[in-house]
Image: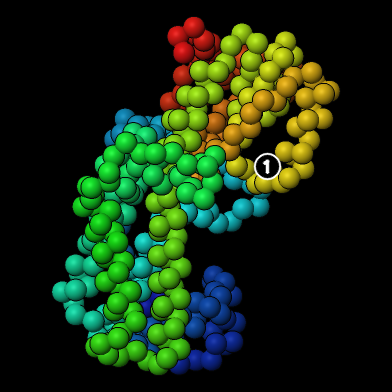
């Protein structure tokens, strides 16, 4: 006799001594049974013994507060968590922060090779501290043009002593040192000494193993100090160059920040600034500026480059859902020909966490 419900499995285990095909044929009279269930019953009978009751698992349900669930959904649907990428993209590059992760892996390899555990813990803590410093405080230290610390002085860092056009005297003697900047140099130098193993205190698997670790370390070191220089250049571009451009604007000028479509026909002069996207990385675009000026009768007087990977990804996350709503608004039969039309579209199709307004620059206050 075959019984259903929870005891069905136990009864099947009693009959596992019979061939599988015979059991399937006998069961057709009562209820069809699959070969998989029979094999599963035989396996349980072999491990637990025939006839052992099958315990029914107990599941516990937790009731969630609907208000908290709606609040959570509202947060994760905000545009600050979006990433606008090209179609077909499967992975997103984490940027220069991955260089610190590489150094952490190098330190772990040194630990396996026999480095002191206390030294490993100290190095990892200092690396985490320096990573946070470059992400947050370092750009705040580079706000001023001149600074007594050479690591924070934009004039000193961007000067070229071999070119008079890019040379400028700094008003400070650079007699101060930044503890965080010096600690970054120090921790990288300590790792380099350990990787080279000149004191023969580390036991690598072989010469090839050491060479691989040295290569990873040198690449990470180069990218970290390039990142540091990138932050300083970005502060110089975002503050000095941007303010210089805004001061030069008047009633006859236009600032092109994203594409030529934002250019107004009644503006005889134009100042272009691009965001270092991949489509702009070509000489033909710069070479065509003269022809564009001739056809549109708008003289492009200046062309600035925005430092890549300097906060634009955050703005892209916010703009991504806004662009989607604007496209849907256009698909409904509306025209967008001005900033006021774009504001109307975003008011009709609002995006959570975003407010829309039309602003004008008061050039008399610049």
Which residue appears at 36% of the width and 68% of the height?
Answer: 103
Is residue 293 found left or right of 199 in the rendered image? right
Query: Pointer 1: what residue?
Result: 280
Which residue appears at 67% of the width and 46% of the height?
Answer: 281
Q: Residues within 10 Å of mark 1 (few under 14, many from 20)?
A: few
Which residue appears at 54% of the width and 23% of the height?
Answer: 245
Q: Looking at the picture, how far across and down is residue 267, in whole percent? A: 70, 13
Query: What secondary structure is marked by label 1?
Result: helix
**From this viewpoint, is residue 360 visible?**
yes
Q: Looking at the picture, how far across and down is residue 284, in whole percent? A: 77, 43
Which residue appears at 27% of the width and 46% of the height?
Answer: 174
Choose top left, top right, bottom left or bottom right for residue 105: bottom left
Is residue 290 found left or right of 340 in the rendered image? right
- Viewer-nearest residue: 311 or 83: 311
Is residue 75 found left or right of 123 in the rendered image? right
Q: Looking at the picture, how far across and down is residue 84, in whole percent? A: 57, 41
**From this viewpoint, is residue 61 visible?**
no
- In the image, is residue 329 above or below residue 71? above
- Viewer-nearest residue: 266 or 335: 266
Q: Looking at the picture, how far across and down is residue 363, in whole percent? A: 51, 10
- In the image, is residue 264 above or below residue 166? above
- In the image, is residue 94 above or below residue 190? above
Choose top left, top right, bottom left or bottom right for residue 182: bottom left
């Amino acid at each position: 006799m075959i019984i259903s419900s929870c005891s069905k499995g136990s009864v099947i285990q009693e009959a596992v001594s019979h061939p599988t095909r015979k059991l399937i044929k006998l069961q057709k009279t009562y209820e069809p049974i699959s070969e998989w269930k029979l094999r599963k019953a035989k396996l349980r009978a072999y491990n637990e013994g025939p006839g052992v009751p099958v315990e029914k698992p107990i599941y516990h349900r937790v009731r969630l507060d609907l208000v908290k669930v709606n609040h959570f959904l509202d947060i994760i649907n905000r545009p600050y968590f979006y990433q606008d990428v090209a179609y077909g993209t499967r992975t997103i590059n984490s940027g220069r922060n991955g260089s610190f992760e590489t150094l952490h892996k190098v330190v772990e390899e040194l630990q396996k090779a026999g480095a002191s555990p206390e030294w490993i813990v100290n190095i990892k803590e200092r690396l985490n501290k320096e990573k946070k410093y470059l992400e947050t405080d370092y750009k705040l230290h580079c706000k001023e043009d001149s600074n007594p610390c050479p690591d924070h002085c934009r004039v000193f860092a961007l000067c070229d002593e071999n070119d008079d056009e890019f040379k400028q005297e700094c008003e400070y003697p650079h007699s101060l040192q930044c503890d965080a900047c010096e600690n970054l140099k120090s921790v990288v130098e300590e790792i380099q000494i350990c990787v080279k193993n000149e004191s023969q205190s580390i036991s690598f698997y072989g010469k090839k193993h050491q060479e691989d670790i040295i290569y990873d370390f040198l690449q990470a070191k180069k990218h970290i100090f390039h990142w540091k220089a990138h932050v300083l250049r970005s502060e110089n571009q975002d503050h000095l160059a941007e303010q210089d451009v805004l001061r030069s604007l008047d009633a006859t000028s236009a600032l092109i920040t994203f594409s030529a479509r934002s250019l107004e026909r009644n503006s005889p002069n134009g100042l272009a600034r691009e965001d270092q996207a991949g489509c702009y990385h070509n000489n033909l675009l710069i070479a065509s500026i003269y022809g564009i000026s001739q056809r549109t009768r708008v003289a492009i007087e200046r062309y600035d480059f925005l430092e890549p990977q300097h906060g634009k990804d955050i703005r892209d996350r916010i703009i991504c859902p806004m662009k989607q709503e604007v496209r849907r608004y256009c698909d409904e039969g509306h025209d967008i020909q001005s900033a006021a039309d774009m504001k109307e579209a975003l008011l009709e199709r609002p995006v959570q966490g975003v407010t829309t307004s039309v602003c004008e620059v008061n050039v008399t206050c610049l």
